[in-house]
Image (tube, rainbow, N blue to C red):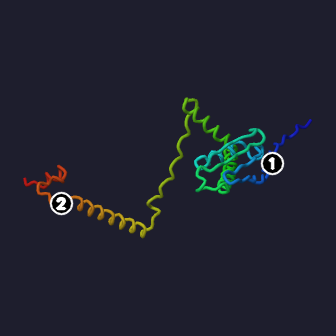
Amino acid sequence: MKAKKKTPKKSVKKAAKSVPAPTPKLTASEASFSLDVKAHGLEPVLGAAYLLTDRAYVALGGDRAKILTVTLRPKNAKALKPRALADEFLSDLASQKVRWAVAKNNQPVREYVAEQAVLIATGQIKPAAPAAAAPEPAVDELTDAQRLEIEKLIAEVESEIKTMNADKAKPSVADPKNAALSWEAAQEKKPA
């Protein structure tokens, strides 16, 4: 009797349905939306509404499992019109949908990282060794022209450092008692 070969089942993800943007109901003082929670998700709707709380009063109503009604009234009616507020809400809603989709897809990774951190902290597993640094190229691999260029650059830097140190040693203001000098430098200047 032959053993059947098990083939892994391919996970078929449903293509994300394109949900049409909700149409706002606009009045002179507010904008309101009726949103299908199953189509848009509860977290994205609440997140988009929260993002507007600095500019608008937000009222949520309805059934959290079916249809949510979001009413937005600008805090400063002169500065922000209901149409602009509705457009901002739709933009934030689209961003929140993407944000929550990414968070949902990355949940297993975050759980794994947190689990590993706890195991390392409790001493149940040892932390991974750090990756070895890339070896530096050998000096023998440089051409004569490259060596000369490096020596020239080093000489330039050393001369600049000497110039800077000499400038620092000079007192910027007349200092007859050498108060600005370090103790060692003042001792060197004293006649023996």
Up the image or down, 173 lies above or below 29; here it is below
- As helix, strand or loop, the secondary structure at mark 1 comes to loop
Left or right for 121, reference 35: left
Q: Position of residue 2 (x, y in %)?
A: 90, 37
Q: Position of residue 37 (x, y in %)?
A: 75, 43
Q: Residues within 10 Å of mark 2 (few under 14, many from 20)?
A: few
Q: Residue furthest front?
A: 28
Residue at numbered disc 2: 173
In the rendered image, is residue 51 in sight?
no
In the rendered image, is residue 153 in sight?
yes
- As helix, strand or loop, the secondary structure at mark 2 comes to loop
Residue at numbered disc 1: 14
Residue at image coords 38%, 68%: 148
Instruction: Tell me the kind of residue under disc 1.
Output: Lys
Instruction: Tell me the kind of residue under disc 2.
Output: Val
Going from the N terminus, do you reach mark 1 or mark 2 first? 1
Which numbered tag is attached to residue 2? none
Q: Residue furthest right?
A: 1
Q: Residues within 10 Å of mark 1 (few under 14, many from 20)?
A: few
Residue at image coords 10%, 54%: 190
